Image (cartoon, helix red, strand yellow):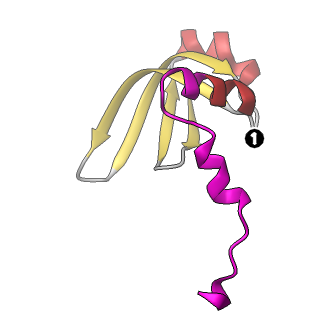
């Protein structure tokens, strides 16, 4: 069994790997990897703890994540423009 700390853009959460899944995925767990998880989510409101019991794990590149988000209409190129435009706050 293993516990891994994960972060997303919106919140941090804990991933739980039981023995079967750990033996299958342990070689993919490396600091800095972008992974897509599939499993069962639970939220402990009292302790504000979010957990995913991991059933599937896949290493992905940032490009793969973007493509998947585009396919599900969660991302488009207009989001990139917000970060690529320089804004002079002193003039506003």
- Is residue 62 in the magenta section? no
Q: In which quarter of the image is the C terminus?
A: bottom right
Magenta residues (range)? 68-92
**Residue drawn 28% across and 44% down?**
44
Measured from the top left, where is residue 36 in percent x and y? 59, 25
Where in the figure is residue 27, as x and y percent of width and height? Answer: 76, 19
Residue 16: x, y in percent?
A: 49, 28
Q: Which residue lies furthest to the front in this view?
A: 91
Residue 3: give x, y in percent of width and height.
55, 34
* Residue farthest left in this picture: 46
Instruction: Tell me the SS state at disc 1.
Output: loop
The residue under the point 65% across, 9% down is 24
Q: Quadrant of residue 71?
A: top right
Identify which residue is drawn at 73% across, 57% down.
84
Is residue 1 in view from this perspective? no
Is 81 in front, or is 16? 81
Foreground residue, 82 or 26? 82
Establish if 28 lies above or below 92. above
Horizontally, is 14 left or right of 45 in the view?
A: right
User: On the picture, is 53 further left or further right than 19?
Assistant: left
Question: Quarter of the image holding residue 57?
Answer: top right
How many tags in the picture?
A: 1
For residue 46, above or below residue 40: below
Residue identifier under label 1: 32
One can see residue 34 in this view: yes
Density class for disc 1 (Cα within 10 Å; few <14, some 14-19, many ≥20) is few
Say which residue appears at 65% left-offset and 89% top-offset: 91
Instruction: Work out whether 38 lies above or below 3.
Output: above
| Image quarter (top left, top right, bottom left or bottom right) of the N terminus | top right
């Amino acid at each position: 069994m293993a516990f891994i700390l994960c972060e997303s853009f919106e919140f941090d959460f804990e991933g739980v790997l039981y023995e079967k899944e750990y033996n299958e995925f342990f070689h993919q767990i490396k600091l800095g990897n972008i992974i897509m998880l599939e499993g069962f989510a639970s939220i402990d409101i009292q302790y504000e703890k979010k957990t995913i019991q991991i059933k599937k794990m896949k290493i992905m590149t940032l490009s793969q994540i973007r493509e998947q988000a585009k396919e599900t209409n969660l991302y488009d190129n207009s989001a990139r423009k917000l970060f690529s435009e320089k804004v002079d706050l002193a003039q506003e």
